[in-house]
Image (cartoon, rainbow, N blue to C red):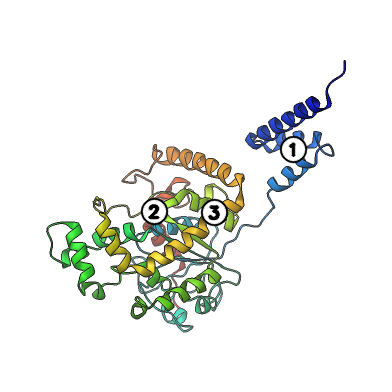
Amino acid sequence: MKVDTKVFKVITLSACILILVYLACVEDQTVRHLIMKSWEGNSSVLRDFSESETEQPCTPLSNVVFIKTHKTGSTTIQSILYRYGLSRNLSFVFRRQNKRNGHIPYGHITESTPRKLFLPVLEKVNCSYKGYNISAIHVVHNRPVMETYMNPGSKYITILRNPASQLMSAFLFFHLDRKVKGNSTELKLINFMNGTTWKKSPYGRNGQSHYLGLNQSDFDNHTKIKEMIQTLSKELHLVLISDYFEESLVLLKHELCWSFGDVVFTVQNNRSRPKPPLSPVLLQKMRSFNYADFLLYEHFNRTFWETIKKKGPKFWRDLREFKRVQNETMQKCFNSSTMQPTFNLSGDMNSFCEQYAGSARLFEYLFDKQTRKC
């Protein structure tokens, strides 16, 4: 029986497309490998597909500087870093005079800061203030100084949030609304932005840019703001976006070569009052008031999605797998796909579920562990 050449080519091409679609859905790497092996040498298209989908081996990284920002989901990221460091006996940057959380809120650091303020590095015969593994406290970003006391090759990471929702959250969470008059939250916020009260609080204006190194005196200096963004683009390895939290954690997993279980999270500090919807007038006012934060967010939100696009279909498969692991872990430890509002755990930090109890409890354990006389 004679088969038309054109028809044969169409049938063959259709078969190849169906196989490619099937391969994209196959999660089991063993099955995938066997299928690819059987087609080896028969299709350059399939060889290219296999090579692009092969994940390169990497080594998990333990040295991280996380620039913690306010009301951005940063405490949740902090708890992930604490949990990772706890299980691997890593050294943390903690302010020894601050036994509550170890922070240096909006503090500027110099090369002499570690010896003056920090707890010493773990497990060294003599007290040392160089070679820390993880910094996850509130402190103003200064990479040249941080490099003098962090381990070489540390990854520099931060998290940003839409400046409108971040400002409203901070305004209510830090009770800034009590400092101004108004019959509604919106009117109070407008009066806050129109007045000078914000100058007395580090939380009220451009709080994200401030932690990333922008001086309050430069809040209206467009040149300085753009210079800051350009510098951060070179100094930061990864900027997470709070508004896309799970996607951010998959990127964090990729950047640090961690497992899905390493980035499982429980929500922290989600206790602020319900926030009213934002009117167009208020949004425009916020944009002018928080100009630096808006430029900062828009730049790194754009690079965030560019990074995801470059990773291709594998990113979305990893996101699905992460959500599965996240849900299973929360069901196991809290009998819920989301975090319970209270914890009823044993207090034993060596137990699997106890390590998800939150950054405050993890901090206490880590702080005591690293404390010694020098």
What's the distance in space between the residues labelled 1 and 2, CA to CA? Answer: 40 Å
Q: Amino acid at mark 2?
A: Gly
Q: Position of residue 87 (x, y in %)?
A: 52, 55
Q: Amino acid at mark 1?
A: His
Query: Eyeballing the image, is 324 above or below 114?
Result: above
What's the distance in space between the residues labelled 3 and 2, CA to CA? Answer: 22 Å
Query: Which comes before the other along the chain, label 1 or label 3?
Result: 1
Residue 358, numbered label: 2
Residue 251, numbered label: 3
> Taking 88 as reference, is 285 left or right?
left
Q: Position of residue 47 (x, y in %)?
A: 77, 43
> Taking 228 as reference, is 195 left or right?
left
Q: Quadrant of residue 334?
A: top left
Q: Residues within 10 Å of mark 1 (few under 14, many from 20)?
A: few
Query: Eyeballing the image, is 315 above or below 228?
Result: above
Q: Position of residue 302 (x, y in %)?
A: 49, 58
> Taking 240 as reference, is 185 left or right?
left
Residue 33, numbered label: 1
Q: Position of residue 55 (x, y in %)?
A: 68, 49
Residue at the (76%, 40%) spot, across then down: 46
Query: Which comes before the other along the chain, label 1 or label 2?
Result: 1
Residue at the (72%, 43%) spot, across then down: 49
Which of the pair 16/373 is nearer the observer?
16
Q: Residues within 10 Å of mark 3 (few under 14, many from 20)?
A: many
Residue 255, numbered label: none
Whether residue 85 is visible here, answered yes or no, is no
Residue at the (25%, 59%) spot, across then down: 282
Q: Amino acid at mark 3?
A: Leu
Which of the pair 39/126 is nearer the observer?
39
Mark 1 and mark 2 in contact? Answer it, CB < 8 Å.
no
